[in-house]
Image (cartoon, rainbow, N blue to C red):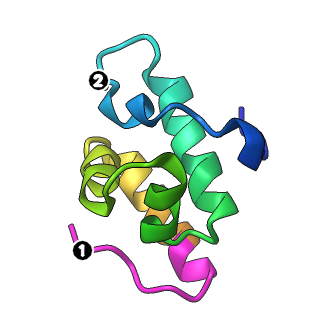
Amino acid sequence: MREPIKLSSLPDPAIVAVSGRSAGYPAAMGKALDVLEHAGWSVSDGAKLLGVSTGRLIGFLRTDAQLWMEVNQRRQEAGLRGLNA
């Protein structure tokens, strides 16, 4: 389930450390997508909102092939170039 984010209550930066094997992973993935959508699919802007490095956010996104493809598709729809694998 996706929700718009509020700048007054951003997700905890720890969401990018949630393991794909964790029961909390789907929620963390959804929150990361919500932040990226709010940031216009800019990974660097999304990372700033979360308070993590761009590399850390990209590392989290890369852990799941479907998540990676979704982000790249959304970036392309927004007129941004795809992220390298």
54 in relation to 28, above or below: below
Res. 74 image quadrant? bottom right
- SS majority, magenta: loop
Residue lying at 60% horizontally and 51% vertically, measured from the top left: 35
Depth check: give the residue in front, 51 or 33. 51
> Which mark is on residue 33?
none
78 vs 66, left or right, is right
Q: Secondary structure at mark 2?
A: loop
42 in relation to 33, above or below: below
Q: Tell me the quarter of the image containing the C terminus.
A: bottom left
Residue lying at 31% horizontally and 30% vertically, measured from the top left: 17
> Which mark is on residue 84?
1
- Whether residue 5 is visible here, answered yes or no, is no
The image position of residue 13, as x and y in percent, is 44, 36
80 in relation to 62, above or below: below
Span highlighted in magenta in the image: 75-85
Amino acid carrying label 2: it is: Ser
Q: Secondary structure at mark 1?
A: loop
Depth check: give the residue in front, 73 or 81. 81
Q: Along the polypeptide, which appears first: circle 1 or circle 2? A: 2
The image position of residue 64, as x and y in percent, is 32, 42
Task: Name the residue that disc number 2 marks.
Answer: 19
Q: CA distance from mark 1 to mark 2?
A: 22 Å
4 in relation to 80, above or below: above
Is 34 a magenta residue? no
Dot 1 alpha-carbon crowd within 10 angstroms: few under 14, some 14 to 19, many 20 or more: few
Residue lying at 38% horizontally and 78% vertically, measured from the top left: 82
